Amino acid sequence: KAGVTQTPRYLIKTRGQQVTLSCSPISGHRSVSWYQQTPGQGLQFLFEYFSETQRNKGNFPGRFSGRQFSNSRSEMNVSTLELGDSALYLCASSLFSGDSGNTIYFGEGSWLTVV
Amino acid sequence: GESVGLHLPTLSVQEGDNSIINCAYSNSASDYFIWYKQESGKGPQFIIDIRSNMDKRQGQRVTVLLNKTVKHLSLQIAATQPGDSAVYFCAENIGGSTLGRLYFGRGTQLTVWP
């Protein structure tokens, strides 16, 4: 059974550009969440989607957005990139978002460098 | 070896020794806890989890202990191996309106010496 798949794995963007990251959850998983990881701030929650609806959102500016498709695949977008957006972006999936205790599995992440 | 994840972010142990990684959580409403292992350049890998109605849970070479009274979580790794070298994170889920959201600790770097 394939794990959480994220693409692209590495990318370099210029300040002011936008970027779209993609995530395919584990087959059968309906909840997808996104995290940003930086050395200074650690792992921070961006947002979570379930059944194409955003259920939770972290404390990030509106430049960060996401969506989930009917097949549970998800994308996140960052517009008007800033140098501080350089980070590892992690996608995670779980079977169901209706109860705590659902094991949450992470992908390998997308490394974004903004220059 | 023993380490408090938030205050002593590094732990060095000899191969074959047992490791104890500690984590303090802040929200008494948290009802689900997970330990993740993250190797350099990779995403967090699930190790073991525990629900708040349990005090202890064992896996293969790993044990998680939960003390709700003092809001403390620990991960014990038996017979630590070089392959265990990584950053270990504890994460908590509060449930309720934030079901799908995990709150992560800062992490503890475990280094295993041969």
Image (spheres, coloured by chain):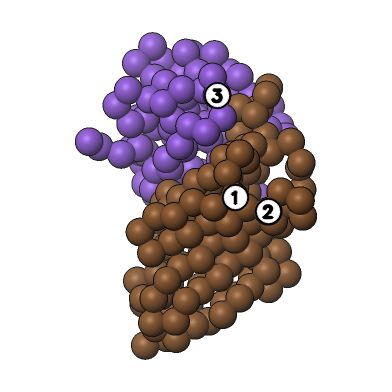
Chain colours: A purple, B brown
Residue ID for mark 1: B55
A2 vs B12, nearest the viewer: B12
Mark 1, Cα crowd under 10 Å, few <14 / some 14-19 / many 20+, is: few
Residue drawn at point x = 39 percent, y = 83 percent: B15
Q: Distance between the Cα atoms at labels 1 and 2?
A: 7 Å
Q: Is residue A20 above or below residue B9?
A: above
Residue ID for mark 3: A99
Q: In this view, does B61 lie above or below A42?
A: below
Residue ID for mark 2: B67
Mark 3, Cα crowd under 10 Å, few <14 / some 14-19 / many 20+, is: few
| Local SS, label 1 | loop
> Where does residue A69 sit, x and y in percent of width and height?
41, 15
**Residue A100 vs residue B24: left or right?**
left
> Where does residue A15 sit, x and y in percent of width and height?
59, 44
Which amino acid is tagged 3? Asp
Camera-nearest label, 1 or 3: 1
Chain under numbered label 3: A
A79 vs A103, nearest the viewer: A103
